[in-house]
Image (spheres, rainbow, N blue to C red):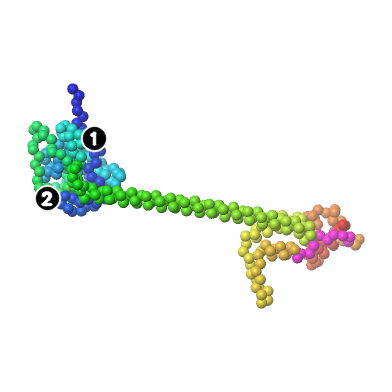
Amino acid sequence: MATKNTSLPPGVEIFRSGKHTDDAGNVHVFPPAVIDEIAASYNPALRQAPLVVGHPAANLPAYGWVARAVAIDGELGRVLTMDSRDVEPAFAEMVRNKRFPKRSASFYPPEHPSNPTPGKWYLRHVGFLGAQPPAVAGLKDIQFSEQTDAGVVCFSESPAGNHPSQEITMDEETKKRLEEAEQAAAAAKKAQADAEAESKRAKEQLAQFAEQQREQRHAAHVEFCEAAVKGAKLKPTKKAAAVAVLDLLGDAQAVEFAEGDTTTKVSPVDFVKGLISDAASAVQFGEFAPGGEGKAAKDMSDAELDKAARDYAGKHNVSYAEALGKVATFTA
C-alpha cells in the first residue's frame, strides 16, 4: 500500500508588505523592512507559531508548527513565507487537496504584553481558511470564539466562493497601478533612449559637416597660397606654414577695429590673406645690373637666399625685396 505524502511544501506564503486592514477594521502599513524584521525575529525557541484553522482565540488545536519564517521578493512586494514541521497527516492531506485555499496570519503587535520580542511584530499563528477542520481522532474539537485575544492583530482572506475581501480588492487595484506604473516607466525609458539616439545622430552629422567644412577651407587655403607663390607674394618655403596658419584661423571669430569714425569687422583669415596679397614681391625677376653685391641666385639655396636677404634688410633697414636685389642677382 502506497504511503501518502502528507508533508507541506516549504516556502508557503502567509503575508506580504503593504497596507492591510485587520479583522477589527484597523489599517496597518507593513513596509518591506518590517517583513524582513518579522522573519528575522521569529524564533520557535521563544514562542512557536501553530498552524490552525481560522483564527482561534487560544491558538488551539494546533495541526502543525511554523519551523521558520523567511522573507522573499514577490510580485507585489516583500513576502513572508514559512516552513512547517510536525504537520498532522490528515490536515496536510486536506491542504494538498486544496480544501484550504486561503491562508492568513495573526501577529502580536510590538507593544503586546505576550510578545516575546517587544518593540517588533511577532508571528502568533498561521490560520488556514476555507473548510471545516479535519476530524482527527484524539484531537480536541476546534473552539471558535467571536473575539480574538485582546490586542492581537489578525488578517483574514475570504474563503473560496465568497466575495473578495477589501484586502483582495486592494491587491487587484495595487497590481493594476503597478502595471500602469511599469508601462509608464517603460515608455519614459524608451522616449529617453530615442532622444539620446537622436541627439547622438545630430552630433555625428554636425561633426561630419564640420569636418567637410575644414577640408574645403584647407583646399581653398592651399589654392590661395600656391597662387601667392606663383605671383611672387609668398616664398615657396613659406607656403606650408602659411597654409597651416590659415587653417588654424579658420574657426576664429571675426575681429572689429576702428578706422577713424568707421568700425571695420574682418575675419582673421581674410586679414592674413590681405597681408599676403598686398606684400611686395618676394622674388624679383629679370636682369639686374652687373656688379651687384650678391651672388647669383641660382647658386644659392632658398634657405641661404632667405637668410641673406633678411640679414641685409635688418642691417640696412630696407625692404625684403630690396635686400634680395642686393644679396643676389637674378636672370629670367
Q: Look at the picture and state if 2 lies above or below 161.
A: above
Residue 33 rendering spot, x and y as whole percentages: 27, 49
**Which of pointers 1 and 2 lies earlier in the amino acid sequence?**
1
Residue 281 in the magenta stretch? The answer is yes
Q: Left or right? Give the position of 145 relative to 285.
A: left
Residue that appears at 17% across and 47% down: 154
Q: Secondary structure at mark 1?
A: loop
* Extent of the magenta region: 278-288
Residue 106 rendering spot, x and y as whole percentages: 17, 46
Q: Secondary structure at mark 2?
A: loop
Residue that appears at 66% across and 77% down: 261
Numbered circle sitting on residue 150: 2
Q: Quadrant of the C terminus?
A: bottom right
Residue that appears at 65% across and 73% down: 263
Count of number-bearing discs: 2
* Pointer 1 residue: 9
Gap in Å between the C-alphas at discs 1 and 2?
32 Å
Assess disc 1: are there few (<14), some (14-19) or many (≥20) residues with their C-alpha within 10 Å of its C-alpha. few
Q: Look at the picture and state if 36 lies above or below 88.
A: below
